[in-house]
Amino acid sequence: MPNLGIPELLIILVIALVVFGPGKLPNLGKALGTGLREFQRSVRGEERPQADGGRPEEESNRTGA
């Protein structure tokens, strides 16, 4: 695989700017970063932190009983 230097990265950035537009690039970068982070966690076998403090949801809460 060829080495990517500064000129090549700038060309890729300009092409991405033309294709996606300036409004979507921040969202695209955020989504890419989140995806890479999730991939790295799955490769390492780490669990994703829960939004409720890491406590597992009880079975009765899911069934409504």
Image: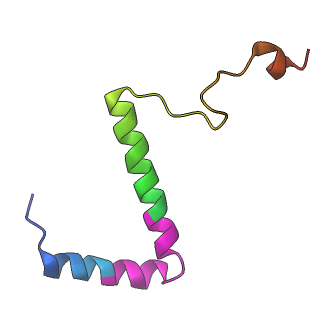
Q: Residue furthest right?
A: 65
Q: How is the image coloured?
A: rainbow
| Residue 17 lies in the magenta-colored region | yes
54 or 36: which is nearer to us? 54
- The magenta region covers 14-29
Q: Quadrant of the C terminus?
A: top right
Please indicate whether residue 4 sits to the left or right of residue 43 in the image: left
Residue 40, position as x, y percentages in the image: 34, 39
Q: Residue furthest front?
A: 53
User: Residue drawn 77% across and 14% down?
Assistant: 59
Residue 13, position as x, y percentages in the image: 31, 79
User: Residue drawn 39% across and 46% down?
Assistant: 37
Residue 55, position as x, y percentages in the image: 64, 24
Q: Quadrant of the N terminus?
A: bottom left
The secondary structure that dominates the magenta segment is helix
Please tell me in which quadrant of the rendered image residue 43 appears.
Answer: top left
Residue 8 lies, with reference to residue 63, above or below; the image says below
Please indicate whether residue 38 sits to the left or right of residue 13 in the image: right
Q: Residue furthest left?
A: 2
Please tell me in which quadrant of the rendered image residue 29 appears.
Answer: bottom left
Please indicate whether residue 22 sits to the left or right of residue 11 in the image: right
Residue 29 lies, with reference to residue 34, above or below; the image says below
User: Residue drawn 47% across and 62% down?
Assistant: 30
